Image (tube, rainbow, N blue to C red):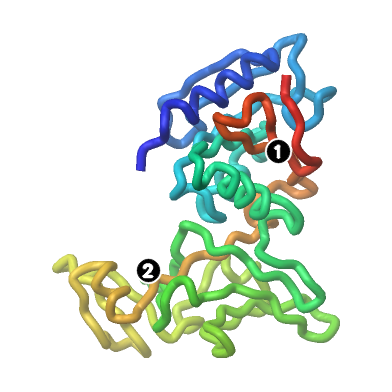
Amino acid sequence: MPVYPSVRDHGVELCERAGYEIEPTDDRRRPPVLAAPTRDAVGLVDPEDPRPVAVEPLTEADVGPAGLVPRFADAVREGRDCLFVVPSTESTGTTLTQVVATVLGEPACVADDGPDGRHFYKGPDRVPLSDGSYACARAATADLQWREVPVGDERPRLELGVGTEVVAVFESIDDLAAPQRHAFQHAYRRADDGRFEVTAQGEVVERFSGPTAMRHEGYAPVPMPLVPEHLFPEAADLERWAVCQPDGGQQVLTAAGLHAWS
């Protein structure tokens, strides 16, 4: 789904009005627009603290944890504020803005953070295993949930669950740095002939023409959870974001609320 030019252009216009110099980029590994503050610039998040801004125009498909959190983390690591610009249509504009604020607001970049531990959003990356395969589970991706579970006074363990069923267990979130094959009952890999093989206990149990066929038969690749301490620098300020839409004029929504940026 293409980015609407009006979405990108609205972000550029807001930055220029606030005293920023615009630098378009063609590198897909970087935001499509970077903005540098001039001497008289007004800061995006804090008017008295103008920082460089990464302008991230989004499509409807991008507005979710997997599309938002990695982009925001990239900006924070580079010392930039992040301005998300969402499409503005009668049916979705305000709703999309609210989704961005919900994902990035408190609890920042996690689905839930309560007395029983955190529930993590699912990211865009798969879980690679020690034998070169990738984890999968007999469940729909939407039903998979990464959550922390308290264990006495020790660090909480990490569980992947489907409803009340536990699919995988790790002693802590740090174990995701190098998951072992035995952590999951099922895994998949691409065979030499290009087909996808699902394995269990070292044996091939199913073969598929591709990932779509694999999902259709009930095997979902396991997405890596979005864990803030794995994505952001230590003590990072997770309120350095704002979101706007073309029909919102100069209004931007930040963690502190709605205000005009100029």
Q: In this picture, is 20 found above or below 129? A: above
Rendered location of residue 233, percent (x, y): 71, 47
At 66% from the left and 64% from the top, the residue drawn is 111
For residue 218, which numbered disc appears in the image? none
Q: Which residue is mark 2?
A: 132
Compared across the picture, whether 137 is left or right of 73 comes to left
Q: Viewer-proximal residue, 217 or 208?
A: 217
Q: How many marks?
A: 2
At 41% from the left and 35% from the top, the residue drawn is 3
SS at circle 2: loop
In space, the residues marked 2 and 1 are separated at their CA atoms by 43 Å
Q: Nearer the viewer, mark 2 or mark 1?
A: 1
Instruction: Give whichever of discs 2 and 1 has the lower sequence position.
Output: 2
Q: In this picture, is 38 found above or below 195? A: above
Q: In this picture, is 12 found above or below 203? A: above
Extreme residue toward the left, this view: 193
Where residue 197 sits, quadrant-wise, is bottom left
Compared across the picture, whether 246 is left or right of 214 comes to right
Q: Viewer-proximal residue, 103 or 202?
A: 103
Q: Viewer-proximal residue, 113 or 13?
A: 13
Rendered location of residue 140, percent (x, y): 42, 76
Compared across the picture, whether 192 is left or right of 44 comes to left
**Quarter that holds the C terminus:** top right
Callout 1 amino acid:
Leu
Callout 2 amino acid:
Gly
Rendered location of residue 127, percent (x, y): 47, 67
**Quarter that holds the N terminus:** top left
Asked if marks 2 and 1 touch (Cβ < 8 Å), the reply is no
Q: Which residue is mark 1?
A: 253
Rendered location of residue 122, percent (x, y): 54, 64
At 76% from the left and 43% from the top, the residue drawn is 255
